[in-house]
Each structure stands twice: as structure tokens, then as C-alpha cells.
Image (spheres, rainbow, N blue to C red):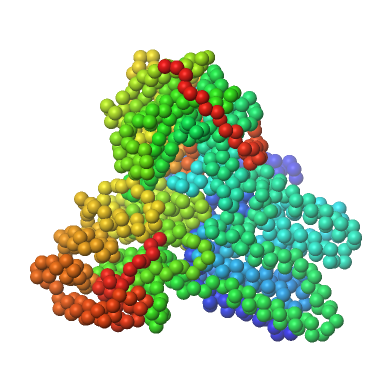
Amino acid sequence: MRRSIIPILALLLTACSPKEPADSVQTGSAPHIFPDYTDVTIPGNIAPTNFLIEEVGQDYVTVLQAGSDRVTIGGNSVRIPFRKWQKLTQSPEIKVTVYVQKEGKWNAYNPFTLTVSDDIDPYISYRIIPVAVESYEKLSIRQRNITNYKEKVIFANTMIQNNVDQTCINCHHYQNWDTDNMMFHVRHYKGGTILVLDGKLHKVNMKTDSTISAGVYPSWHPTHDYIALSNNWTHQSVHAASHDKLEVIDENNDIILYDTRTNTVSPIENDSNELECYPGWSADGRTLYYVSAHYEGEFGPGRETQLFLDRKQLHFNLYSKSFDPETRVWGPKQLLYDAVATDSSMTWPRVSPDGRWMVCCVSTHGIFPLDQIASDFVLFDLKDNTYRYIDEINSQYAESFHCWSSNGKWMLFSTRREDGVHTRLYFSHIDEQGHFSKPMALPQRDPEFNREFLNAFNIPELMKEPVHITPRQFASFISSTEATRSNYEPRKGE
Amino acid sequence: MAKTRWIPPVVLCVLLFFISHEFIYGVEEKSLFVYDLFWLKDFLCKPSGILSCCSMFFIQFLHIPWLGTLIWIILLILSAELTRIVYRIPVSLSALAYIPAAIFVSYNMSVGYAIYLITLQGFFFIPVLGYLWALLTVVVLRKFRNPVRLAILFVIWGFAGYYVAGFYSLAGIVAACVDTMFSDRSRSCRLAALAGTVIPLLLAPVAFLGTTTYNLSNGWIIGLPEKDFGIAPLKMQFPLMLAMALAVIAPMYKFLSRLSSRKAPMIIQTAALALFIAIPSVFWFRDDTFKAESGMIHAANNQEWKEAVDIFEELQSKHADDPTWQPTRVLVLLKDLALIKTGQESERSYSFENGSRMQNNDCIVPMSFQIGKILYLNYGLPGICNRWCSEETVLFGRNYMTYKYQSIIAILFNDTNLSREYLNILKKTLFYRKWAIEQLKLCDNPGLTAQTKPYDTILQLMCYDDIITSDSEGCESFLARHFNGPKPRRATPLYDRVALFFAMDSKDSDLFWARFMAFLDSNPASTVGKYYRQAAYLFSVINKSSTLETLPFDDTTKELFSEFMEKAFKVGNVSLEEARQAFPANLRHTYYFYFYYVNELQMF
């Protein structure tokens, strides 16, 4: 009996496994697939780039070939077996051919290539946020192993907030892609900045009598125990009839330096006629880049309204400032990009680990690239102080927060290119000449994930390792610990 | 006494005819069930998510109110009859088994305005389904007589059940334990049941919530309403806790039939029957304004504007004899929008009563959550509508209406990918599939949008340059500010009509003339309805304007004004209520009456 079952099972399995069509007609065009992985460059250690074939047909076969390794997959939802994928990615190129059966005949689409390139840090973290203006009932900061599809929560606000008091969490950040030194902010109920220093938890309140707010957008110094942060006094308003849904302004901004060892805050820039924001360290930690808009409006009850009215005149220039990490002495500020002259606005400067490149978001005005459809990336070559729009990445929708991989070969960024509203994560490879590859979407097990998951991915960060502190450890610590108030110290230098 | 056995199920069936369809529509529209694994997964990964999911499965049938209600009543009768069978309650005491069902009915029917604030997705069927799960727990755990096996099963069922039904499962485990205590099983069995109950009761919430992102302090009440704005959570939770407590003590009912007095069971049955009828009667939220508001909201969601006006008219006629009656602002705003949509505002708007009566509720429902998205979309402010859809989604969960409105907005902006995302979700629902397929045709042919309802009128009202704004002052004030602001350069005839309507409401003479002239420029003279004429005449008289001679005012307008002023001199400066009593209908239903007597309306 057993002898007869085995061949029957084998026969059934063979019958079910797809075969590459022997006869097919060339369509002469590339297949429509989602996400668009046609001719992209992928990290060597990335999870399988599952995709959906968006061609109408009765049957589908996809053949992935790399050297002598060949994988054939049936159906329009192409889910690549993990072990076979690992073999395929050993080769420098994977050729993908899609066949679609229409009216009984097989059509072969032009093959596309997945170019296998440098590895990338194996983990990323991001905030999952519903697309809303004021409500933040369900926020979570999550980490994903991008060599597979495993996602875990780092911390979620639902773990501590109760029926009355709400908590916002934001701006997670790491020192040098390591999770032993990391931070994120908890706002309102049980609020404070959560710092992990050498694996130990701390909760601080960076708001002092001499600063306008607690710390907001952070940049951790690469070699010393400092974090540069912006202070923001933020408002938002809704567009009545525009593709841009939301307008964000800051009534006031400064930037501060936080010393993690002494719990001390000191101002870096706090000119009352300047709105300074988005600090970003150079690779050696001896220069701080930031943006600032000149605004002379009066402080008072009408300032918010006036700023909204003047929002199109808010052009954020790009500045740099030298810094001696040993003495904490600052040099004078230097204008790097005159946004006023170009009628644009520069935000989120991030320097590559080799110190050669800097990518910023550029838009028509304002401080918040995420909500501006016009937001694009520009690449600065810090070697010769030139810049260019990264046309190979920019889309018709908003490009926003980005970060570099630790080897400087990849950039991870958030973009609304898929539907204009929900921010998704994409990678792009940069070569020696500063050319980026066609962006590729963060692979998901279910290729339709991005179409069905109607929350946004916010502030992506690459990490060399996962966060080891569990969500419940964070929750218990945040619930039970009062934030230690930071000390204030005047700025040194100039 | 056996005859009384049929009273409770018959009463429940009769309820079918008394349940307001308008409320039922509201329950359905604020729910969502998608035939899609991705959507289901979101619920399956959390304790009591399966219960929510099952409830929302049944809620979808409320789209056809009699069908959904019938399912509900069948489940209620099933829960009661199973209680009777499971606990072997004698027929002479059968009404006791129906008391939890009565609590469930009163709980659902007492929700009222809180329907706009309930955060528990699938709240409508959750209690009865949770109760059925608890009964199943008792039945399953009763099967075992071996103490070791019984203890193990209690623990396993306790943990697994918590994942399925949260609070209701914990109540079920306790009920099974009490049932064991009052059974003829051995002492070791009773001890096993007790031990097997304590472990999941204490640890299941910790074990499951330890792997999820919920606040541990809510672990024991998962499946009950948690955070419902302005409503004390305990008020929403207590009835359900009471119903489950009755399930827990039900094993003791059988002792009641053994009471020495022969009359005792009869007295208990009568008392239980009285309770069964009294509980829903006392707590049932009956409010014709709420019913009318719900009906108008449902009509507006379906773009059935004539139906919306009819509902208002019917409510008003019910209160024709009551001079103190006022509509709520929700009713007035929906009626005004419906009149504009049907092109009747110039002929009918002031023929309806006006007012700002407070809603009959003990929680404050922000107007934005109740009708914000209807007003903003249909008045050509899709960005603000989208904002409230988003907030509603975050606070109360996704529902058919937010997807519907957000699909329309995405189509209006020609965001094809986004509209497809929303519509593909609605395509996987039972009753909104057809609508979604119709809208998908617009994604393929965006050129048709401007000729298709409701997009045509919305696009005509989107003729202003984009503004960034906030409706923090309230929906009505915000709309007035929008339409009473500077005239857009690209103003359409419809925009001029709506702006004139808002200008009349503002009673501002200068604004009225500016809007009236713009209206005359863009709309045919034949559309100058009677209330526009009345307003023009009134402002001409007040301002002693030359328009009195230049505009061709008809005799009816002039005569009515004279008649009104004559009466007004007699009546004098009185309150709205007094004026309503003093003025006959033909004078009350004029712009003149609105101008002089409808004052100090409270806007929200």
C-alpha cells in the first residue's frame, strides 16, 4: 500500500509544480509588477522580493535564474522560497522572466534583472502611524529583520496609556547603527525622552527654563556622548482642497546639545529671528549641519496664524557649524545652501558614513517634507561642494526622512510614491560616483501588503542589530519612572 | 406555568418591529467586515479579536435591518434557551434564563448617541456571542469527570478561550467552575475545577498581553467597552458584567424549583418575566430626534437628499402642536444641505422650524464625528472631510463610511492608486461591493467624474483656491466662515447659490447684497426663489435702498412683509418660543421671522 502511495504523491506534486512554457510569444515589453522590482539593485542579504504580476491572464509562470540556479514559480502572486532565494542571491545577477497565459497562449515578457550588490545592515526600525492629524491612539515603533520578514514591536503607546491619558511616541534614533545607545521620545502621559545608554534605561526631561521645548529631532554624535536635538513648537493645519493634506509649521525652533553623561542641555543655535532645526552630524563629528529659516514675526498669540499665512516665505537654508568634541567649543555658522535665493527649503541633512555625501530633502517651502508633495532629495558632494537633485530616486510624491547604511552603500528612505498618502520604505544603492540605483520597496511576505496596510511607515533607521530591550521592559520602565530634569549650561565658543 | 415559557421569545420577536431601522443603519455603517485574510489577521492576532470579528460578520447583515435584527433575535433566543437546557432550569422558571438576553437588548438599545463614540469594534453582537461562548465553556468542561483531565482542560480551555473571547471567556471559566461546584461530581473534581480556574483567570491576560501591545491593566476586561469618550466606562461595562454574573450563578437556579412553597416558582417566574420586560423598557433609548438624525445621516451617506428632507418634515409635523419644540443643529444643518442638494433652498429653507435644542444625551458628541464628513464633503471641502475620516478611523476603527468617503475624495483628486486601494477593500465586502465596482469605473475613466453624482456638485463647490484651515470653532461656524469669506475667482453658479444661502443665514446686509449680486450674475433670474426675494426686500427696506424701486419685487413678497411687520409691532420683542405661538404659520415660515426672531442659536 505504502509503495503505491509514494509514487502517486510524487506524481501529484510534479503535476502541481509549474513549468516554464515551452512555446511562448514575446510581448516586447516589461511586465507590470507590484512592487516595481524591474531592474533594481538589491542588497545581497535582503529578504525575497516577492511581487504581484499585474497583467491580466489565466495562468502565470515566473522563472528566476542566476547562474545554474533556477526557480520556477506559478501564479500571479510570486512568493520566492527563502532557501532558493538565498542561493540565487549568491550570483551577481538574477534574471527574472514572467510568462502570462492569455487566451490559451503563453506570452513572455521582457526579462528583468535583479542586480545583487553590497549587503545592508540587517535590521531597520520605523514608527507605524495611522494617517491622521491629531489622533494618535495606536502608535508603535517596530523593528524588522530585513533579511527575512520578521517584525517585532520595540514599544507601543498602547502599552502604557489608559482610558483617559494618551501617550505619543516618536523620533527613535541610534548611535552609529548600534542599539546599545538609542533613544526615543514619549510625549504627554508618562512623558520623557527614553535613553538607552550602554544598554541601560534612562528617562529624562530635556525641557529647561531656558529652552523652548524638550528635544525633538535628534542626531547622535558618532564618537562622543552628545546628541544634537532640535527644539520645536509645532502646529499643524489642514488643506481644504489639495493633494497636500497637511501643513506643519513651527512657531519657534532652536537646536541644543545634550550631554548624555551629565544630563546637561546647552544651546547650539537659539536666535529668536531664526527657526533652526534638523541637526545632523558629519561622519567625524567635527561639523554639525542644520537648517534654518529667517523669520522676524513677533512672538505672541497671533504668531501661529501669521506663520501659517507666511508659510510660503519660510525657506530653510542649509548651514554648518564646526565643533570640537573634546572642548565642546562651536565655530561660527556657515551658509551652505541659500534656499531663499532658490525659492526652496532644505530639511533633514544626513551625511554618509564616509563623509563624502550628504542627502537633504528639498521642497518649495516649510519645514516638514513628509506632508509636501513637492519634497524631493538633493545630493551634496561634500568633496567639491556641488549638489544635484537625485532624479533617479525622486518621484511625483513626497520623498522624506532618509538614513544611510553603516557601510555607506545604501540609503533607506520614506516616500509616498505608491499612492500619495501612505508613506512606504524604499532602498537605493549609491555607487562611487554618487549615482543611486532605481529604488526598491522594502520586501514583504505578501506582495500586496503595501496596498492593504493603510498605516504609514515613519522615520526609518537602519540598525546593525536588533533592540534587545523587550517592549514590556520599556513599558514597565516608562510607567514606573519619573523623568529626570536636564540641567542647562550656556553655549561655549565662537 | 408552562404557557409563560413562550412569553419571552415572543416578546423578543415583537421587538423586531420596534427597533429603529435608523439606529440599526448607524450600527452597520460604523462597522466593517472584509472578506480578506489580511484584514482578518489584524483581528486574529489579539485577544477577543475573533469575537469582534464574528460580531462584525453579523453586523454586516444589519444593512438589511430586518435580516440583521432577525439574526440578533435568534442569537438572543438561542442564548436563553441554551441557558435553560445547559443549566437544566425547569420550564416553570424559564424566564430566568432570558434575563441576560434582556440585558443585552437594553445594552444595545440604550447606546443612543454613544454610537458615535464607542471604540469597541463590533459592540452590537459581542455580548450575545460572548455569552454563547461562556455557555459552550460550561458544556465542554462538564464532560470530564477525571480530576486530572478536568484540571488540565480547564487550564487549556481557559487560555485558548481567553484568546477567542477575552472577558467573556474568563466569565465562562468561572461559570464552569461554579457549575462543577454545584454538580454531583467528586470532591477532587471540584478541587481540580477550582485550581484549573484560578490559573487562567490570573495568568491568561498576562500571558497573552505579554506578547501583544496592550496595557496589562485592561487585560481582564478585554472584549468590554474600554474607552468611550465622555461615557464612564463602568456604565458601559456594568450591564455586561451583570449579565455574565447571571451566567455564573445560573447553576443555582435549579434549587429554586425545589423550594418548599408551591407558589415560589410561580412568583419567581412572574418576577423574572416582569424584569425581562422592564429592563429593556426602562433602558431603551427612545428619542425621535436621535431617530431622525440617524435617518438623515443614513440618507445623506447614500446621497438620498429628498429622503433626508422628508425625515425632517415628518419629525416637524409630529411636533406641530408644540410651540417649544426646536430641532437640533444636526437636523438643521443636514436639512439645509439636503435642500441645497435638491435645489429647494430658495423656496423651502425657512418653511422649517429652526433652533438649537441640545441633544438628549449624557455625553457630548462632537458634531465633527457625527456629521462632519457629510457636511465637509458635500460642501466641497474634501480635505477637511478626509481629516475627520482619518481621525474617526484612528479613534474608532475603520468602517464602511470612512472608506466610502475617502474613496470619493481620492477620486475627486484623481489619486487613482489611492482610490483603488480603498475601493478594493470595499469590493471585498458583502453590501458595498456593487458601489465599489461602480466607482472603480471612474478610476478607469477619470473624465467621467465631473458628470457623475455626487462628484459633480462637490467639484463645483471646490472652485476656491486651496486654503489651510481648521474647524476648531465647530463645523457650523467653520462652514459659515468659509462661505462668508472672499468670493473665489473661479466661483461657479452653485457656489454663488450656497454662498447666498449662508449670507442670508448670517443676516449681514452688506454680505447679502454682495452674494445676491454674484448670484444674479451667474444664475438665471428664474431661480430667485421666494426666500431670496424676501431677504432682498427686507434688506432693501432696512437700508432704505434704491433697490426697492429697481428690483422687480412681487406683490406677495411685499404684502407678506407688511403683514409680518404689522403682527411684529403687536407681538413686540419676545422670545422665539413666544413668537412661535404668536405668529401664524404663513408668517412664521418667512425669512422675516428668521431675521427678527431666530436669534442666539447655539452653534457647534
User: Is residue A147 or residue A423 the one in the foreground?
Assistant: A423
Q: Position of residue B468 (x, y in %)?
A: 33, 46
Task: Tell me if B158 is positioned left or right of B548 in this view.
Answer: right
Which residue does the image show at 35% across and 52% down from the upper left? B382
User: Is residue B498 or residue A384 the one in the foreground?
Assistant: B498
Q: Is residue B412 visible?
A: yes
- Quarter of the image for the N terminus of chain A: give it: top right
Q: Quadrant of residue B333?
A: bottom left
Q: Quadrant of residue B597?
A: bottom left
Up the image or down, A381 lies above or below B92; here it is above
Task: Tell me if A198 is positioned left or right of B176 in this view.
Answer: left
Which residue does the image show at 55% across and 47% down from the upper left? A166
Tell how many labels: 0
Q: Is residue A89 visible?
A: no
Which residue does the image show at 51% across and 33% down from the upper left? A208
Up the image or down, A42 lies above or below B37; here it is above
Q: Position of residue B272 (x, y in %)?
A: 70, 78
User: Is residue A378 or residue B362 the one in the foreground?
Assistant: B362
Up the image or down, B8 lies above or below B396; here it is below
User: Is residue A433 or residue B459 the one in the foreground?
Assistant: B459
Q: Position of residue A135 (x, y in %)?
A: 49, 48
Which residue does the image show at 43% across and 30% down from the upper left? A254
Task: Tell me if B35 is positioned left or right of B532 in this view.
Answer: right
- Quarter of the image for the C terminus of chain A: give it: top left
